[in-house]
Amino acid sequence: MSELRPYPKPSYPQRAKTALHYLLPQLAVTRAAGWLAERRWGVLTTLAVKAFAARYKVDMSEAEKSRAGDYASFNEFFIRPLKADARPIDANPAALCLPADGCVSEAGAIEAGRLIQAKGHSFSALELLAGDAALAAEFSDGLFLTTYLSPRDYHRVHMPCAATLRRMIYVPGELYSVNPFLAQHIPNLFARNERLICVFDTGFGSMVQILVGATVTASISTVWAGVVNPPRPQTVLQWLYPADGADAVKLEKGQEMGAFRLGSTVINLFPQGSVRLNDTLRPGAPVRMGALLGERAEAV
């Protein structure tokens, strides 16, 4: 379980590095990255993919297309699908599976309506959920898991369990990088950044899965709505979905639900008493989509 640990005063180089991110023209950089990532430049694209894969030690053998030359654009490579057997899904019906590859940023209890961001920093569930007090109350004293996706990771996001989508909320915001260094140095980072909040009904109770935007995260997409951003409106937008019928969005455990065009963070929220998190989900622990996230509380 996470706890709010005191964080030492940052050094001058750390303060300078953080200040540079405050000054960065986030939207311009993100738009430029998105434009470049969509270009189809033949051999130049292949060289860029090869260089990126080498720099970040990307395991191309897991991908459906294992050769750099198979990708027409950098974005095609970045959201590359994996081979069918690359990520086995935990088969226990009383268990939830991890939604993404990456590493644990933080995990634990939502205490007094606040989640741990990093050592010395917390933020409120109410701010994270765009000021929706009723929604935040559903997860009061519940549990959360924050997963950071690094540049080398698989960037499609999947479902921890079978679920029915009830709401999708787009929240405009900043586009700070969400790497571990800035998570330690920028207060309320995840509640300040652009994000897409997906609210589901599940056999474990309500569940929220939040896709957080970041610098050079040029877009976020879902399987039911396609690319949600851009455009980037300056107001909160909400979509409601029926529980049944032709317009219902029902997803199975392990099924893809969305993707990042360049990397970011996924945050999951669970109500009090619904699940028990896997004890291995400690800050910095590597995780893989499909592995054990937790189990139904009464099954433990």
Image (cartoon, grey):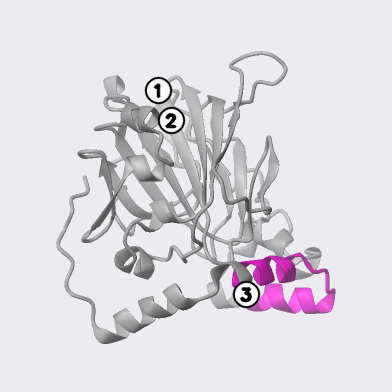
**Apparent side of residue 257 relative to residue 106 in the rendered image (left or right):** right
| Residue occupying the point 21% across, 61% down | 120
Residue under numbered circle 1: 204
Which tag is nearer the camera, tag 1 or tag 3? 1
Q: Is residue 103 visible in the rendered structure shown here?
A: no
Closest to the camera, between mark 2 and mark 3, is 2
Q: CA distance from mark 1 to mark 2?
A: 8 Å
Q: Is residue 260 visible?
A: yes
Residue 207: mark in rendering: 2
Quick check: 103 above or below 27?
Answer: above
Q: Residue at x 60, y 35 (%)?
A: 255
Q: Position of residue 73 (x, y in %)?
A: 77, 65
Q: Could you say which quadrant of the image residue 132 lies in?
A: top left
Of residue 125 and residue 48, the one placed in the foreground of this image is 125
**Where 152 sits versus 252, above or below?**
below
Rate crowding at label 2 as few (under 14), some (14 to 19) or many (20 or more) other CA atoms within 10 Å. Answer: many
**Magenta region includes residue 47:** yes
